Amino acid sequence: VAEAKSELIALLDADDEWSEDFLETILSLRRKFPEAAAWGTAYMEMHPGGQLRHLPLDEETRRHTDGLLVNFFRFSIAMQQPCNSSTTMVRKEALVKVGGFPADLVRLTDTHTLFRLALRYPMAYCPVAKAIYHLEADNRTGNYLYSGNFHFFEYASAFRRERGDGQELREDVRAYLGYMHTGSLYNNWLAGNRTAMREIIRDCQGIPGYLWVDRKSVV
């Protein structure tokens, strides 16, 4: 990212695919929504066995075929993460501001980067699938059991401190944090990582959308 010469960065994983008009679509989004820092499109998921699956978008979102500004947090909770690194173009300045793609994470690097961008900047979106995201690759990090706490809370807390106004994070952001961390409890339970489970429960107390668990039940 640091060595990129252009002000705009669009990445494509080696096992994913763009449609022929992906770049045309994404640049059209940029012209329509210049205030955004990230412009993404919907995609289809290629599952093992060759089955293609469209994202479960609602009718209101699907009708905006020429694009719309989306709330990344509400969208991810209600439907599914709207885009990923292979279906998003980002302003280099914004990507550098949020620290780029975190090299210390085993998985969810795309999600973490989009989360940090969405905290700071508007995101524009085309609900028409313009890429194929391959889930059948053997080397995908999503195929491995992840044990530990995610870094979402750490970055959100740092963002609050940087902002310096003493205000809580927006409710939609807090709900997203609870949603993501609740899901990670299961993996940590399978891995027997009770330390991470206690950290997640501590971080998520009082957050709307969080599946509350009595901390004493995590031995």
Image: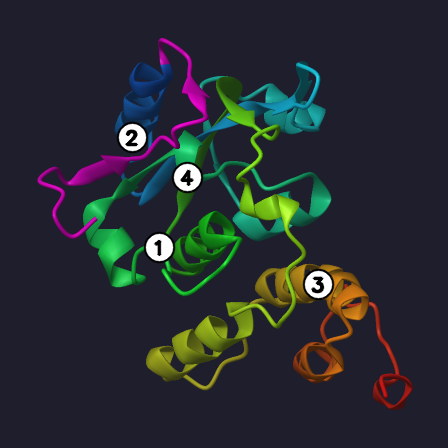
Classify mark 3: residues with Cα within 10 Å, few (<14), some (14-19) or many (20+): some
Query: Tag 2 or tag 3, which sits nearer the N-term?
Result: 2
Query: Tag 2 or tag 4, which sits nearer the N-term?
Result: 2
Q: What residue type is labelled 3?
A: Ser
Query: Tag 2 or tag 1, which sits nearer the N-term?
Result: 2
Q: Give the Cα separation between the discs numbered 4 and 2.
A: 16 Å
Coordinates of residue 124 in the picture (x, y in percent): 42, 36
Query: Tag 1 or tag 3, which sits nearer the N-term?
Result: 1
Q: What residue type is labelled 2?
A: Arg
Which residue matches tag 4?
85
Coordinates of residue 149 in the picture (x, y in percent): 61, 72
Q: In this view, does 31 lie above or below 200?
A: above
Which residue matches tag 2?
30
Q: Give the Cα separation between the discs numbered 1 and 2.
A: 22 Å
- Residue at the image point whose x is 83% and y is 87% from the top: 215
Q: Is residue 92 left or right of residue 130?
A: left
Q: Give the Cα separation between the discs numbered 3 and 4.
A: 21 Å
Q: Give the range drawn in magenta.
A: 1-21
Residue 184 circle label? 3
Q: Give the Cα separation between the discs numbered 3 and 1.
A: 20 Å
SS class, disc 2: helix
Residue 101 circle label? 1
